[in-house]
Image: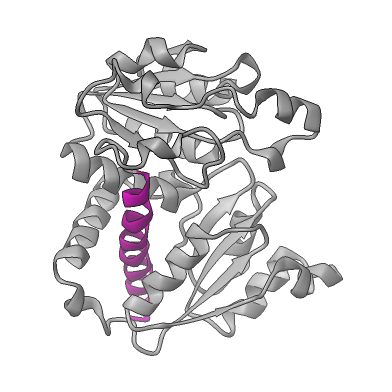
Amino acid sequence: MRSVIDILDLSVAEIDQLLATAQDVIAHPADYAHVCDGKKLATLFFEPSTRTRLSFEAAMYELGGHVISMASAASSSSAKGESVADTAKVVSCYADIIAMRHPKEGAALVAAQNATVPVINAGDGGHCHPTQTLADLLTIWREKGRFCDLTVGLCGDLKFGRTVHSLINALSRYGDVRFVLISPEELKVPSYVKRDVLQAGGIPYEQTTDLEGALPGLDILYMTRVQKERFFNEEDYLRLKDSYILTPQKLKNARADLTIMHPLPRVNEISVAIDDDPRACYFKQVLNGKFMRMALMLKLLKEAGTL
């Protein structure tokens, strides 16, 4: 049974096809309004979520399907000690496809190995968040019209940021991209990402702590929050949480066609004064995420033979 746990589970050709499907959904929504009539999505979120969960649910409703979900991890059988594997087997009896978020890295893979329906990883710890990456790619495509010849600045929590790791993996496969990795020393991109993705692929990158110095050379700025839930020491979080705050003043030397992205939720890292700047695209990302999740669910349900 085909599932998507990591963005690397999808080939470049498959990602391109998903982008095409999403853009067709945008152009012809009525053609997709009943494609999933009678189908059920189960959303299993063992971690708090607003955008991702509602995006999956809205996506299935707009395809004509239904959604079943648990109110919270505390109200599920996991609170009684049920394993992820057993949960996946049980929920497979009720739904045609599962979207799952879990705080433990690898949990979504365990679910996929035990489910009898497709499983989509909606975020597992600090590991992967493939559908956020699909949302990011559609946003870049709609704003820039290309994935090549781009300088992409990734700023903030690059150590625990699963969205950052997935985006590096995805864009690196298109080639002719350069990364500027902007973070405090304590939150640098993990060495395995640099070694296995950037260095292995010959992708040029530089590391810096200076956001303002990097801004003039960027085509895309991808801001991230410092994630309190990933820290073991609250003192470290408090010391690092406001390392980077993007303000109109800091954008004065940035390119007029800069694309500013953020997977959300934001805390302080982007001033609300930037929301009306035409370069701000983070709320467009939210909408693009719904379209890409529609495209992905359609693909997996078709491959499973249930559409």
Query: Where is residue 74 drawn, in percent x and y?
Result: 77, 68
Instruction: Determine whether 55 is above or below 60 in the image.
Output: above
Q: Residue at x 82, y 68 (%)?
A: 79
Looking at the image, the residue that sits furthest to the bottom is 38
Quarter of the image with the C terminus in it: bottom left
Instruction: Look at the image and say whether residue 211 sits in the magenta stretch.
Output: no
Whole-percent x, y for residue 224 in the image: 50, 35
Residue 217 or residue 112, whichever sits in front: 217
Residue positioned 58% across, 24% down in the render: 190
Residue 273 image offset from top left, x and y in percent: 39, 36
| Relative horizontal placement of residue 141, taking residue 226 as reference (left or right) | left
Is 97 situated above or below 188? Answer: below
Residue located 27% across and 56% down the image: 18
Q: Is residue 299 on the magenta stretch?
A: yes
- Chain part drawn in magenta: 282-307
Which residue shows up at 61% across the image and 33% down it?
A: 226
| Most common SS among magenta residues | helix
x and y percentages locating residue 86 in the rendered image = 72, 72
**Is residue 146 positioned above or below 59 on the image?**
above
Front in this rendered view, residue 22 or 300: 22
Q: Is residue 3 rendered to the left or right of residue 178?
A: right
Residue 70 image-quadrant placement: bottom right
| 284 horizontally vs 89: left or right | left
Position above or below: 26 against 167: below
Quadrant of the image occupied by residue 231: top right
| Closer to the camera in the image, 270 or 5 | 270
Outermost right residue? 80
